[in-house]
Amino acid sequence: MKKPKWVVEKEQAKKADAAATLWLFGLHAVRDALVNPKRTKLRLMVTLNAQTKLADAIAEAGIEPEIVDARKFNAPIDPGSVHQGAALEVKPLDWGTLEDVAIGADTPRLILLDRVTDPHNVGAILRSAEVLGASAVVGTRHHAAPETGALAKSASGAMERQPYVRVRNLSDAIVALQGMGYLVLGLDGEAGQSVEGALKGQKDRPVALVLGAEGPGLRQKTKETCDMLVKIDAAGGFGSLNVSNAAAIALYASKDHS
């Protein structure tokens, strides 16, 4: 019996995911991946200079590097990439499901991203999430920054340690989190109350902060699914914050500092 088309497509997508690899580049991103036991490392290309700088990490990873002439660095990465003489082929990290990262922390904080596609912004958000103790950053499988070398470089090592989970549908993920007891707050400059105001007296609750891309902001469906919309109080009419800055401030504001 012939398999339905959707079954075939699903199987093909699963095979493609299993075969997928990415190239990380830059000394910081490569070093952090080399010493991450959860990261499957396949191929390391380095110049002699980079090999010296990464010697301890290379030894810890137990990987045999390929030495490349600095003038002919031919790793399969974008020619404009600032690779610093190091490139590492790896398998993507598997952080599990939304439930895996949403349950467990004492007072969990999640950052949800609604079509934030710029890897530099997502990388900066991952760094802030790690520093400020977020349980995870959650994006969508489509219309979101995938795990790439550019994202890893922007995250400055945080991609190896900070869970970054991607879901099929953001509104469904919000509903699932609400079912787990999360208060879901959507960041919107036109909202009537601040993050602190919405959380007054309930900072011990699990909270998910939802941020949209600069310009379009949150989609209408996302706004309607959130429990409430909130804003970051500003000192004056100076325009909107960059999404990565907004994520850091909102995350800090949502935490209990008592």
Image (cartoon, rainbow, N blue to C red):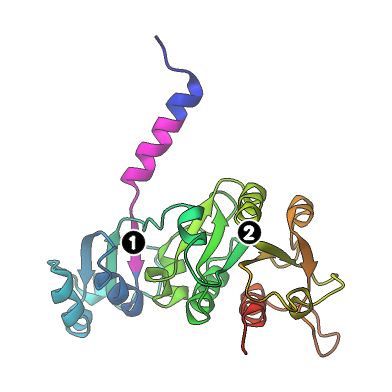
| Viewer-side residue, 152 vs 140 | 140
User: Residue 22 magenta-drawn?
Assistant: yes
175 above or below 7?
A: below
| Viewer-side residue, 68 vs 163 | 163
Which quadrant is the C terminus positioned in?
A: bottom right
| Residues drawn in magenta | 10-24
Q: Residue at x 20, y 77 (%)?
A: 57
Q: Earlier in the sequence, mark 1 or mark 2?
A: 1
Q: Position of residue 188 (x, y in %)?
A: 78, 68
Total residue callouts: 2
User: Residue 178 magenta-drawn?
Assistant: no
Classified by dominant secondary structure, the portion drawn in magenta counts as helix
Amino acid found under the numbered disc labelled 2: Gly
Amino acid found under the numbered disc labelled 1: Trp
Q: Residue at x 80, y 85 (%)?
A: 234
Q: Residue at x 31, y 55 (%)?
A: 91
131 above or below 216?
A: below
85 above or below 3?
A: below
Q: Residues within 10 Å of mark 2 (few under 14, many from 20)?
A: few
Which quadrant is the N terminus positioned in?
A: top left
Under tag 1, what secondary structure? strand
Q: From the viewer's perspective, is 108 left or right of 39?
A: right
User: In this orientation, does residue 70 appear?
Assistant: yes
Dot 2 corresponds to which residue? 181
Q: Position of residue 12 (x, y in %)?
A: 40, 32
Q: Position of residue 198 (x, y in %)?
A: 77, 73
| Viewer-side residue, 100 vs 122 | 100
Q: Tell me the number on the disc at residue 23.
A: 1
